[in-house]
Image: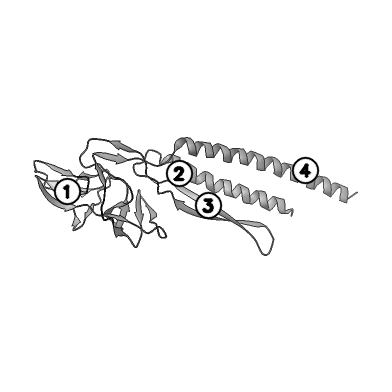
Amino acid sequence: MDPSFYQLAAAAGYGEARMAILANNLANAATGGFKADQVTFSEALDAATGAPVIGATPYVDPAAGPVKQTGNPFDLAIDGDGYFVVESADGRQFTRDGAFRLSEDGTLVTRDGDPVQGSGGAIAIDPQAASASVDGAGRVWVDGAQVAQLEIVTFPSESPPAKAGGNLFTGTGDTAVEDPKVIPGALEGSNVSVIAEMTRMIEIARGYEAYQKLVQTLDATAGQTNEVGTV
């Protein structure tokens, strides 16, 4: 088979993989704290056929999303690097989504009810307290007394956390952020740029059209060659 067909198939596979990622990013453009997925591609030649083989390496874009004030004292955004720590059903995990609330027993939890972790474990706040708040350093105050310190961690650049579903991450090698900066009464939005992702989708769609035309041209050329060969 003409190696050009392999090259076009590889390019089409590249576009298909990118399209799936872009679609997922767009679906989460309004998800608080969501980090866009991206992918890098590398090409190698198959030793047997000489055809190109595309290798895809996914990664998470760590850029911060826009911060929006909500006025809710338990809505928290991290200013800069770091992740909140939660205790989920799958163990210790991490998130940038700071839409927290108090459970019925006064535990600070995520949207899904996972306990938010402080330096001493789960954070308990008396539901009957006259006042409760979190300050810019991540300290939790109840009726004028500090009762906890939010656990905010970071990861080495060579081993970033991986997505675990439900807007949570898993990872190892985390260390505490020494001087955490928290924005109380605010939430970080998704870092997905709808305009940028739509533009990329249009580019991929145009690429598909070009690949299709090239395949048709190659197919027609091959047909003509076969006809000449049988005369």
Amino acid type of the residue tagged 2 in the rendering: Asn
Q: Is residue 125 left or right of residue 94?
A: left
Q: Is residue 189 left or right of residue 133?
A: right
Q: CA distance from mark 4 to mark 2?
A: 37 Å
Which residue is labeled 2 in the image? 24
Query: Reading the chain from its start, which is encountered first: label 2 or label 1?
Result: 2
Measuring from the top left, give residue 93's x and y in whole percent. Answer: 31, 56
Which residue is labeled 3 in the image? 40
Q: CA distance from mark 2 to mark 1?
A: 35 Å
Which residue is labeled 4 in the image? 220
Mark 3 is surrounded, within 10 Å at the Cα level, by few (under 14), some (14 to 19) or many (20 or more) other residues, namely: few
Q: CA distance from mark 4 to mark 3?
A: 33 Å
Q: Is residue 139 left or right of residue 83?
A: left
- Is there any visible trace of residue 91 in the rendered image? no
Amino acid type of the residue tagged 3 in the rendering: Thr
Mark 1 is surrounded, within 10 Å at the Cα level, by few (under 14), some (14 to 19) or many (20 or more) other residues, namely: many
Q: Secondary structure at mark 1?
A: strand
Which residue is found at the position 67% from the left and 51% from the top? 7
Mark 2 is surrounded, within 10 Å at the Cα level, by few (under 14), some (14 to 19) or many (20 or more) other residues, namely: few
Q: Is residue 79 left or right of residue 119?
A: right
Amino acid type of the residue tagged 1 in the rendering: Val
Which residue is found at the position 34% from the left and 44% from the top? 33
Looking at this view, is 4 or 195 the one in front?
195
Query: Reading the chain from its start, which is encountered first: label 4 or label 2?
Result: 2
Which residue is labeled 1 in the image? 140
- Is there any visible trace of residue 168 in the rendered image? yes
Q: Is residue 62 above or below residue 193?
A: below
Measuring from the top left, give residue 153's x and y in whole percent. Answer: 29, 55
Q: Nearer the viewer, mark 2 or mark 1?
A: 1
Q: Cβ–Cβ below 8 Å for labels 3 and 1?
A: no
Q: Most extreme residue toward the front, as rendered? A: 179
